Amino acid sequence: MIYREHYINPVRDFYDSDLIKIITGIRRSGKSVILEQIRNEIKQKTDNVIYLNFEDKRILANISNSEQLLDYVEENKKSGKCYIFLDEIQMLDGWQDACKTLRLYDNSVFITGSNSKLLSKEFTKELSGRYVSFKVRPFVYKEILEYTKELGKECSVTDYLVWGGFPKRFEFDTEDAKLRYLNDLDDTIVINDLINRYHIKKEGLFKNLVNFVLRSNSRIISAKSIHDYIQQKHESCSINTIIKYLSYLEEAYIIETIKQYSTRTKNELAYYLKLYNEDVALNSIRCMDNRYDLTHNLENIVYNELDYMGYKIYVYNNKGREIDFLAQKDNKKYYVQVAYSVADEKAYNREFSAFADIDNLSQKIIITNDDIDYSTSTIKHIKLKDFLLMDTLDEK
């Protein structure tokens, strides 16, 4: 497996901190591998390291509650600071109390957990601010190229647009095997992590909502639009129920929503949300007859890549014209428009006109899958295949 320095580097500053280090993110995004890579790095300087994976039934059979975990650590740690790695910690009864206790006695604690019980909004409640969290997402394209090279395989940009970046899917050679893996993963996320966890009784309604939402990536979304869709299915539900279900999807890192930045109010408008999937495969596995939604998946991938690069992202309302992204970092603003192609004259005029009346103090960028360079004197065109290899938007 490739070394994911992008995620390990920010954790490094906290190796010796008494704060609990939480590696979080959607299922099968590579959290356990990163935990192992951090552990191997620390083992270069000390052998006072304890690692337990609670998905291993042998471990769980002997350590099933917080008291047994505390006893095990006390018996096996050496003198001085001990580095404790607890993988899939949610399997352990009372894991919260154990972690809070361990950090008090010269231990550095690292944990991962599946989304079924270790969700982002629960960190504050369960650990009372005694933690620092690091989110991991599935592979971006640069990581895919590195990993497929390691496997002796290749991955085209189109393959990425359809099947996304869940690491394990690259191990499968046939589309049937890939689909089986991604569908099983989807079932685990929706059923185990959400329906079972929240005891959702209207399973059919919830699954219809999930299917609608995950097919609606890179679009404006609202509780009302989902409600209208559900009502068409002759199912009764309230707006509040839909809002609650959407929060479940966001907590489990299945979707992300971004707000609009308005030129009129100069602030965020909370009622206007655009939705993106954590991985575009969540859309593609719901498509029939290979009619994949490449246009919206392309915008979704640009969002994921910009997020990976560290940009704060908004939708931008330019006096009634929507610009897909206002990306901000290091006091710089970048207006980014995304289209599958601008080869057609109408598409060209539509996409480029979105930048009308924006001054030239900020970078104006359009990203498309075209091979021809459509840059103008004021707007920079970046080919998708080039954008996916960039580390920042400032690269030439």
Image (cartoon, rainbow, N blue to C red):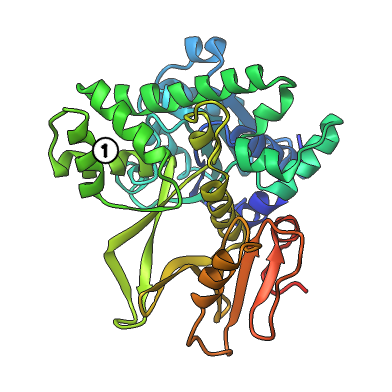
Give the x, y percent position of residue 90.
42, 28
Which is more toward the observer, 222 or 267?
A: 222
Q: Report which quarter residue 210 is drawn in.
A: top left
**Element under disc 1:** helix
Picture residue at 55% right of the left edge, 49% below the top: 295
Q: Position of residue 371 (x, y in %)?
A: 76, 59
For this rendering, which residue is in front, 369 or 166?
369
Along the horizontal axis of the image, is 346 left or right of 224? right
Say if 366 sits above or below 22 in the image: below
Q: Residues within 10 Å of mark 1 (few under 14, many from 20)?
A: some
Left or right, 70 with respect to 210, comes to right
Q: Quadrant of residue 148?
A: top right
Q: Amino acid at mark 1?
A: Tyr
Q: Out of 237 and 119, give the one closest to the viewer.
A: 237
Q: Look at the image and tell me whether residue 112 can be seen.
A: no
- Read off the residue under disc 1: 245
* Count of labels in the image: 1
Hey, which quadrant is residue 387 in on the image?
bottom right
Q: At 44% across and 22% down in the image, what residue appears?
A: 187
Q: Is residue 220 above or below residue 65?
A: below
Q: Pinpoint residue 103: horizontal percent, then vertical percent.
A: 47, 44
In the image, residue 244 sits, relative to residue 134, either above or below, namely above
Up-down: is 49 above or below 380?
above
Q: Nearer the viewer, residue 180 or 250?
A: 180
Quadrant of the frame with the N terminus: top right
Task: Left or right? Give the position of 148 relative to 304.
Answer: right
Q: Quadrant of the C terminus?
A: bottom right
- The percent coordinates of residue 70 (x first, y second) are 46, 28
Instruction: Look at 29% across and 45% down and name the residue there.
Output: 125
